[in-house]
Amino acid sequence: MPSNPELSATTKRAEIVGAEVVSTGVVRVAVPTPLRKLFDYLPPEGLRADQVAIGSRVRVSFGRRHLVGIAVGHAADTDAGVSLKPIREVLDKRPALPPDLLELITWAAGYYHHPLGEALATALPVLLRRGAAEDARGEAIYALSASGWEAARTPPKRAPRQVALLTLLAGHPEGMARTALDAEDGDWNPTLRTLRDKGWLTLSHRSCLPPPVESVIQGPVPNIEQQAAIDAITSASGFTGFLLDGVTGSGKTEVYLRAIEFALAQRRQALVLVPEIGLTPQLVARFRARLAVPIAVLHSGLNDSERLCSWQQAASGEARVVIGTRSAAFTPLPEPGLFILDEEHDASFKQQDGFRYSARDVLLMRGRRSDVPVVLGSATPSLESLHNVERGRLQKLPLRARAGDASPPRVALLDMRAQPLNGGLSPRMWQSLERHLAEDGQVLLFLNRRGYAPVMSCHDCGWLPACSRCDANLVVHQREGRLRCHHCGHEQPIPRACPSCRSERLRPLGQGTERLEQELRKRFPEQTVLRIDRDSTRRKGALHDALDEAQSGRARILVGTQMLAKGHHFPNVTLVGIVDADGGLFGADFRAAERMAQQVVQVAGRAGRAERRGEVLIQTHSPDHPLLNTLIHADYATLAQSLMDERRAAELPPFSALALLRAEAHDLQIAQHFLRSARHEAERIGIAGVLILGPAPAAMARRAGKHRVQLLLQAPERAPLHRLIPGLLKRLDFLPSMRKVRWTLDVDPIEVV
Ligand code: ADP
Ligand code: ZN
Ligand code: ZN
């Protein structure tokens, strides 16, 4: 029930009309708090409640704090039975969230059982969330006017701030952005005002959208399958969900571009979502070269004002195409005509903390609600999407052949059993590397483990350095001389001697990308070796440079983690080596095999994308494993079918729905007790068809010093789960152990270990 957190004695304001007291109504506000309810406020002085537009940001008092919430409804009166506080300020002239978006987020908050206020806050750019004024004109740029330059030459006396600002701006004749100014010390607001009043400043606005290209590049003529896909998408009337299922290099991006051209010609906007790692300058450049319209980009590399600017350009309709990562699913678009989500199988589309939404599922729902076609694309579709094709919820658009002249690579397994390994590579892998390099090829080695070695051990006593806060070994980072925990960030210097037996014979065990890079440099001193992983690309722009280096073919040997596997074009790569395929075969998560297959196929797809036929070698200790054999003798689709059969038999998604209740506490007993009580409550509610599993320890039972336990809720369909969860969450609030644990609910979790 809505109520106001303030129990203070503010009296309800009313207008006196004649003898009657007429209420001005109340505004229902979603406030960013974990509390799962709305709060009523009076309208601000001089306004009726219904003059506060739904979707507007409002600043309200909440307890002792001031928060920015969203007006989500009006009511004649509160039923909270308390006196209400007025809204302090309405922050938007036009609602920050248009009705379609507000409804979409409201749906998503309900579906993921997340508090609406927090879900809305997650969807907004940080600056709007904090209450910044909306300014759709772009970033403010201050520069000196003619009289300002005069003043800079003969600075005013006894006005140090004015002099400082004049000097600062004189050093930037092209003008300074508001954010750049704010980065300099102090509050410039009063000084800016003074200088403007004196006529010493000019103020202009810079759009965050680079101007579109004057003449676009013509794309290749689509082949028959591409044309069929383009025709299907462009002739969809209203919502249709498509799965563009095309092998790597089959020209999916070409299909997107043609479909976008069509939407643009209908005066519509297009939204394209890609995985974080896939949103490279190369991708954006490709879109900009082909589409002569303003394109806004939204990704985590932007600063807050750039992000706000892109969002506003999309909201104003200025940007006709928006390319973004997960959270861009919530970008306001006044004229949406096409939604695309590339690499739809990618795990990065599911948010893993806070508001745990899936951008893929949100985008599908958005398409349905806005009656706009949605295209999901992948060379390795998720089993969920393949299942949706079977059920007729998605229409499949196959691209079976590689576009252009490229032919599919030859794939072979390399049996590593009893082989002498050197740097983790078998003799046959080394020979192939030599041959390809001698023939002027480019080679790519995939190893999804960064660092030098996954673990270190004492040769004399067997001591292994483990993280004191997690159930995990510390990873050796040789170059920096550090041991690091990849789960909590803990790090320490590599010890000189074993702390347990004082032996100095400490040895790194196993392979990481850093070690492989070192081995390759030793073996091929005349070649350029390039490593691409999270460590080597930390610096801003480093990934961009590395990808350029790899694409140009200057670097002949590429070593990397999954960062290398996603959607990049390396036209010169002739050999792809997968160093270790076994991890995925025996992973604990029920999606481990699916993920392994996707990774192998994606990495393999980097080989031979141009004229030269590629070769893929997969190292394994299980050369007879049926999964690997299906993968190399048949294809991903066949493998996906057999995985699908296993899931059906085991009643796992997509043949059931899951929700995971996780709890963390410093004390294991408390976490377990909380989930046992939760289980008890769930049983008392008793929804038929819901299976409750646990509480059980998480695969990593301790992380960052906290014990992690989980309770899995499973049902043949979604509906029973959604009937159970709201009641369960209400009861959790009353559990005494609730305050001592950190708990989260994950609907449709992508990892359940
Ligand atoms: P995907 O997105 O499926 O990996 P792309 O759209 O990036 O594939 O296409 C791969 C390569 O093939 C690109 O260099 C692209 O320009 C080229 N290509 C795509 N379609 C055609 C076509 N119909 N004819 C010739 N080349 C094509
Ligand atoms: Zn020892
Ligand atoms: Zn740790």
Image (cartoon, grey):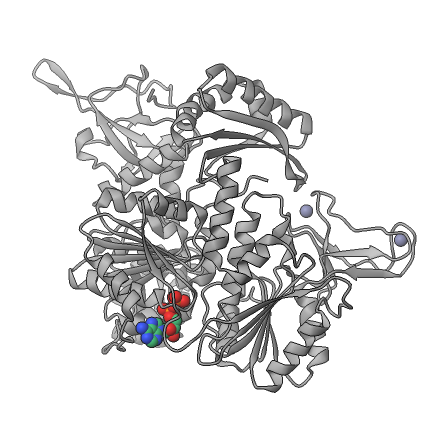
> Which one is in front, 488 or 83?
488
In the rendered view, does 474 fall on the left or right side of 497? left
Q: Position of residue 274 (x, y in %)?
A: 40, 58
In the rendered view, does 453 fall on the left or right side of 47? right
Q: Quadrant of the C terminus?
A: top right
Q: Residue at x 56, y 43 (%)?
A: 590
Total marks drawn?
0
Task: Decide: is 586 above or below 32.
Answer: below
> Which one is in front, 80 or 615?
615
Q: Position of residue 63 (x, y in %)?
A: 42, 27
Task: Decide: is 25 above or below 422.
Answer: above
In the rendered view, does 638 fall on the left or right side of 475? left
Q: Quadrant of the N terminus?
A: top left
> Which one is in front, 627 or 2?
627
Instruction: State which quadrant residue 696 falls in.
Output: top right
Q: Residue at x 42, y 45 (%)?
A: 384
Task: Decide: is 440 above or below 557.
Answer: below
Q: Position of residue 659 (x, y in %)?
A: 48, 33
Instruction: State which quadrant residue 471 falls in.
Output: top right
Q: Position of residue 368 (x, y in %)?
A: 26, 43
**Where ligand 1 lies, by quadrant?**
bottom left
